[in-house]
Amino acid sequence: MSRARWEAEGRDWPNRAASQFVDTARIRWHVQMMGAGPVLLLLHGTGAATHSWRDLAPLLAENFTVVAPDLLGHGFTTGRPVGGLTMPAMARAVGELLATLGLAPDLVVGHSAGAAIGARLVLDGGAKPARLVGLNPALMPFPGLAAALFPTLARMLFVNPFAPHLVAGLARGPGDAKRYLERATGSTIDARGVDWYRRLFSTSDHAAGAITMMADWDLDSLARDLPRVRVPTLLIHGSADSAIALASVRQAAALLPESRLEVLAGLGHLAHEERPADVAALIRGFADAE
């Protein structure tokens, strides 16, 4: 397996000056911290890393102390918690990271699968924020045939030891990362963003982390628990998202007791990378709301 190396893949990492490495039990975390004010935790989605927040994090740092880790199996974070990359285990590990840092987030903001980890973190008591934000959130089980096929496919990839190398090989092909991202997300992001995704997926450890996480993902249990999320929640979704249907996000909003949904016209799954200023404004407004 090849691993993302800080001195190579991270040589010009976005907001590199904000990076540090933090050790907890069995895990060495790559974490970015910046700004001052109430603590805001950023949790990226499957297959991403802290580069996903390259433009949003500095905007939020004008009002908040921003804490953004590379999640388990992703980016420059190494090690595995007890329980592997299941949602409860990942949420528990994030809670342990927060305890080690001595920080209690006032806001938890998660993108895609990061929103699910954020919700699980709140449900399981790993954090007690005043507010929760989901960006293009993956909170509901896959609909229809995908519900049966997707976990099966992910597990088939997981048990095939060559799968991570195949994914990494595809990422090395010229133009593959850009075409894949646009097709899979409905988003068009800048060339720098595409290159950082390509770099990460050119390392088989990162590809394996994304595949392993999906193989163990249990959205059915999360959906059943959403009515117990007792904090005000803002869901922000791009109308052109080709990864998560707007109908799915509406279902999640209906289950959350104190939620509101904002739809950003024409943006895809990576809406926060396409128009970070608009997303930052929505988060700030939600944080300031009475």
Image (cartoon, rainbow, N blue to C red):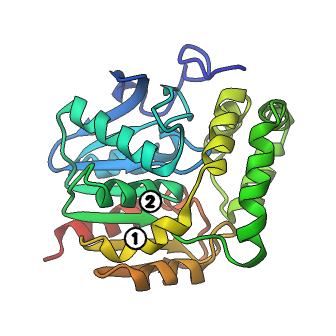
Q: In which quarter of the image is the N terminus?
A: top right
Q: Quadrant of the C terminus?
A: bottom left
Task: Check disc 1 and report the residue beneath it.
Answer: 225
Q: Observer-nearest residue: 43 or 124?
A: 124
Q: Residue 115 carries which label?
A: 2
- Residue drawn at 62 percent across, 67 percent down: 268
Q: Are the residues flagged by discs 1 and 2 in contact, CB closer than 8 Å? A: no
Q: Is residue 228 above or below residue 208?
A: below
Residue 136 is at least partly visible in this image = no
Q: In this view, does 52 lie above or below 266?
A: above
Q: Residue 48 carries which label?
A: none
- Residue drawn at 74 percent across, 48 percent down: 155
Q: Where is residue 18 in the image (x, y as percent from the top left)?
A: 34, 29
Q: How crowded is mark 1: few (under 14 residues within 10 Å), some or many (20 or more)?
A: some
Q: Position of residue 279 (x, y in %)?
A: 41, 64
Q: Position of residue 197 (x, y in %)?
A: 65, 40
User: Splitting the image into 4 quarters, where does residue 21 fall?
Assistant: top left
Q: Position of residue 28 (x, y in %)?
A: 42, 22
Q: Which of marks 1 and 2 is nearer the N terminus?
A: 2
The disc labelled 2 sits on which kind of residue?
A: Ala
User: Splitting the image into 4 quarters, where does residue 191 fall?
Assistant: top right
- Residue drawn at 34 percent across, 44 percent down: 58
